[in-house]
Image (spheres, rainbow, N blue to C red):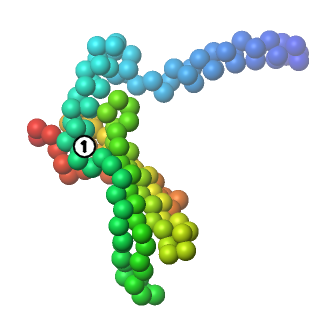
Amino acid sequence: MTLQEKRNKMRRLIPASIAMLLIAPIPASAVAGPESSAARIAAEREAMRKFSWMDGEWRGVAVTQTPAGEQRVTHTERVGSTLDGSVRLIEGRSYRADGSTAFHALAMLSFDPDTRSYRLTSHAEGRYGSFPCPYSVGL
């Protein structure tokens, strides 16, 4: 195969490859149509309303016991909904007395209408976790 033939083949393959990459991540439920998506989002919103009491900014002193002794930090939490109320984000930060950040975490609380269950996904200190929540709806 000549260099020109290889280039022509690549020119045909690249657009098809890009199209596949763009289409592949779309879940089957999203292809079902707008009524399906609207119903799922409405179910998510309704389920997430149960956590609206958490919304706001919170601040207080946090105390932990470590082998080095007692550690005190000022801890803050920012909680609020996003994606039109279907997901709740939770950001926690702790500050040392000198103002430097001692801890920083981000979590997302969501609801799965298919399993009617909640999931908490969190990121902190270079780690990641996704955990089922014990709170359930109508099970």
**Up/down of 52 relative to 17, above or below:** below
Q: Is residue 137 left or right of residue 103?
A: left
Residue 61 coordinates in the image, percent (x, y): 36, 71
Quadrant of res 129: bottom left
**Up/down of 67 relative to 21, above or below:** below
Q: Amino acid at mark 1?
A: Ser
Residue 117 in view of the camera: no
Q: Is residue 57 left or right of residue 50?
A: right
How many labels were placed on the picture? 1
The residue drawn where x is 40% and y is 65% is: 75
**Up/down of 57 relative to 100, above or below:** above
Residue 81 in view of the camera: yes
Residue 89 coordinates in the image, percent (x, y): 38, 45
Mark 1 surroundings within 10 Å by alpha-carbon count, few (fewer than 14), some (14 through 19), many (20 or more): few
Quadrant of res 36: top left
Q: Secondary structure at mark 1?
A: helix
Residue labelled with disc 1: 52
The residue drawn where x is 45% and y is 57% is: 105
Quadrant of res 83: top left
Q: Is residue 124 left or right of residue 130?
A: right
The residue drawn where x is 43% and y is 73% is: 73
**Up/down of 83 relative to 69, above or below:** above
Q: Quadrant of the N terminus?
A: top right
